[in-house]
Image (tube, rainbow, N blue to C red):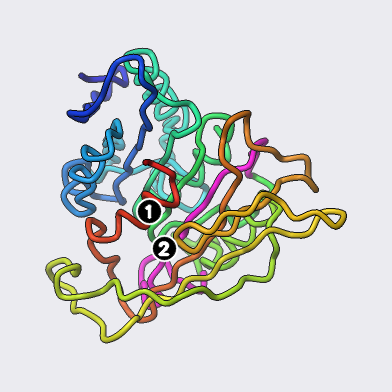
Amino acid sequence: MAAGGQRQVTIHVPSGYQKGRPAPLLVLLHAYSSDAAAVDDYFHLQPVLDERAVLYVVPDGTPDRAGDRFWNATDACCDSYHSGVDDSGYLHEVIRQAENRYTVDPRRIFVVGHSNGGFMAYRMACDHSDTVAAIVSVAGAMYDDARKCSAAHAVSVLQVHGSADGVVPYQGGAINGIKVPSATTTVRDWATLDDCSLSPASARRLDVATDANTPSGSSPLPGAETRVLTFPPELQGGQRGPAMDRAGGGACSGLRRGVRAPPGRLPPLTSQTLTSSDTKAPRFGRRCAEVGALLNLA
């Protein structure tokens, strides 16, 4: 089934899908100069999503003047030729068409993005927080000026970033002369939006970059190379917000700023995963149980 108007996108329907039974929806977004087929192969999520009866959409960005597909996510990434294409509106329409054709659980609509797709995942959380329950950004970032984010509802966030990333620097920097925040600043901004503590707590370390888990062109890293930081709930007048500990995530209440999850949605999680020394994200098929737990796919 295709949706999205002029840009056709296929909605993968899991074998366990039952009409009338609300199913999660996951949207996967590719990096700059990549495409839907490449990111689908790289993340290898479809088998586990089929097993968990998750509707799955992998759309394409538009090609720029150089022929490279991109998402118009933030001022830093990646509408280099200033086309002004409304990718936020387009992806929202893709989600709406999926909801019109299938029984989508409105509490479990998720966006996962790589690099430019990660920037776009944050854009979707900012623009459509009433629709998107959670995002995962792999080597993406927020606006440098968080005031440009108009989120009115709490959104769960997982940021995954390699400390040796030379394209979207973990410590922040610039893309095309426009400032990009660090991974930690990006997550702190969402900790503020979601009313989490601004002081992260370290959780267990993960051994992600293994031989079986490392894509072609990368080398495995020894030991548990990945550090997880969580931004836990803050005390609110002596009361702690709803607690949850999934994939190292801490739940935040969203009370202080009046930012709340829509009815029925899980409380927000804000978490950051740091891979200590790698320039490429590991293949995610082996870690999707962690991501699935965070997103509450089951």
Q: Amino acid at mark 1?
A: Val
Q: Secondary structure at mark 2?
A: strand
* Label 1 Cα neighbours within 10 Å, binned few <14 / some 14-19 / many ≥20: some
Where does label 1 land, which residue? 291
Specify start and end residues of the magenta stretch as a single range: 149-172
- Counting from the top left corner in percent of width and height, residue 182 is at 54, 67
Quarter holding residue 230:
bottom right
| Residue in the picture at 29% in, 30% down | 55
* Label 2 Cα neighbours within 10 Å, binned few <14 / some 14-19 / many ≥20: many
| Residue in the picture at 63% in, 44% down | 149
| Quadrant (top left, top right, bottom left, bottom right) of the N terminus | top left
| Residue in the picture at 26% in, 58% down | 284
Q: Secondary structure at mark 1?
A: helix
Give the mark nearer the N terminus: 2 vs 1.
Answer: 2
Assess whether residue 24 is covered by the magenta stretch. Answer: no
Where does label 2 land, which residue? 160
| Quadrant (top left, top right, bottom left, bottom right) of the C terminus | top left
Q: Nearer the viewer, residue 178 or 158?
A: 158
122 to the left or right of 222: right
- Counting from the top left corner in percent of width and height, residue 167 is at 36, 67
120 to the left or right of 214: right
Q: Nearer the viewer, residue 254 or 82?
A: 254
126 to the left or right of 296: right
Assess whether residue 153 is covered by the magenta stretch. Answer: yes
Quarter holding residue 226:
bottom left
- Counting from the top left corner in percent of width and height, residue 129 is at 58, 35
